[in-house]
Image: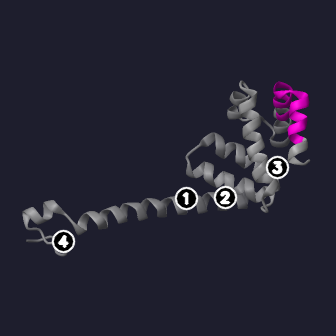
C-alpha cells in the first residue's frame, strides 16, 4: 500500500481503530504485542507514528526480514535489554532463523561489545598515560615505572 493510501485509511478509520487494528496485526505477526507498543497505544497517535516510521524503514530497506530480526536481536543484546532479546529471538525464529544463527549473532554481539570496552579503555589509558601529571610530579618514568 502506498504511503498516501495508508494515511487516507488512518483518516477514514480514525486513530483509535487504526491503533487497535495494527496491534492485532503485530500480535499475529510476532506472536505477542511488546509492552512498549501497548503503552504507546494509550496515546494512539504515538503508536501510529512509531509504526509508520518503523514501516517506512522496513518498506524501503533491502534487507530480508530474518536479517532485520537478527540485527535487532544483536542490538537488544548489546543494549542489555532482556525483553528485546526475547522478542527478537522469537521473531527471528518465526522468520526462519536457526538456533545456530541466533547463537552466532549473540557470539558476534559479545565479541564486539568486548572489543568496544577494551578499545575505549585502552584509548583513555593511552591518553592519560601520555600526560600523567601525578607521574611527572613524583618523577615516575612511564616506560619503566621507576624514577
Quarter holding the C terminus is bottom left
Asked if the residues shown at circle 4 and circle 2 are in contact, with their CB atoms under 8 angstroms apart, the answer is: no
Q: Is residue 142 left or right of residue 87?
A: left
137 relative to 50 in the view: left or right: left
Q: Earlier in the sequence, mark 3 or mark 4?
A: 3
Q: Tag on residue 3? A: none
Few, some or many C-alpha atoms within 10 Å of disc 1 (few <14, some 14-19, many ≥20)?
some
> Residue drawn 14% across and 60% down?
134
Given this view, does label 1 or label 2 mark the residue nearer the observer?
1
Q: Is residue 21 magenta?
A: yes
Task: Establish if 71 lies above or below 142.
Answer: above
Q: Which residues are magenta?
A: 6-22
| Residue under numbered circle 3 | 94
In the image, taking residue 14 as reference, residue 133 lies left or right, namely left
Q: Which residue is mark 4?
A: 142
Does the stretch in magenta take in 108?
no
Residue 69 drawn at (x, y percent): 73, 53
At horizontal 80% and vertical 42% (from top left) the residue drawn is 30
Measuring from the top left, give residue 20's x and y in whole percent: 83, 28
Give the mark nearest the N terminus, 1 or 2. 2
| Distance between the alpha carbons at the discs numbered 1 and 2 | 11 Å
Look at the image and name its color scheme.
one colour
Q: CA distance from mark 2 to mark 3?
A: 16 Å
Please report whichever mark, 1 or 4, sits nearer to the chain's N-terminal start.
Answer: 1
Residue 97 at least partly seen:
no
Residue at the disc numbered 1: 110
Classify mark 4: residues with Cα within 10 Å, few (<14), some (14-19) or many (20+): some
Cα distance in 3D space between marks 1 and 3 = 23 Å
* SS type, badge 4: loop
Of the pair 1 and 130, the residue shown nearer to us: 1
Amino acid at each position: 500500500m502506498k504511503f498516501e493510501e495508508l494515511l487516507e485509511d488512518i483518516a477514514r478509520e480514525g486513530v483509535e481503530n487504526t491503533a487497535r487494528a495494527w496491534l492485532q496485526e503485530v500480535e499475529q505477526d510476532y506472536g505477542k504485542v511488546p509492552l512498549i507498543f501497548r503503552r504507546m497505544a494509550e496515546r494512539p497517535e504515538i503508536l501510529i507514528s512509531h509504526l509508520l516510521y518503523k514501516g517506512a524503514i522496513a518498506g524501503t530497506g533491502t534487507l530480508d526480514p530474518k536479517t532485520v530480526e537478527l540485527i535487532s536481536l544483536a542490538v537488544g543484546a548489546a543494549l542489555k535489554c532482556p525483553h528485546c532479546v526475547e522478542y527478537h529471538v522469537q521473531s527471528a525464529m518465526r522468520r526462519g532463523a536457526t538456533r545456530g544463527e541466533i547463537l552466532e549473532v549473540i557470539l558476534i554481539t559479545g565479541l564486539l561489545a568486548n572489543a568496544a570496552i577494551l578499545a575505549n579503555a585502552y584509548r583513555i589509558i593511552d591518553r592519560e598515560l601520555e600526560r600523567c601529571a601525578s607521574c611527572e610530579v613524583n618523577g615516575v618514568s612511564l616506560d619503566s615505572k621507576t624514577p
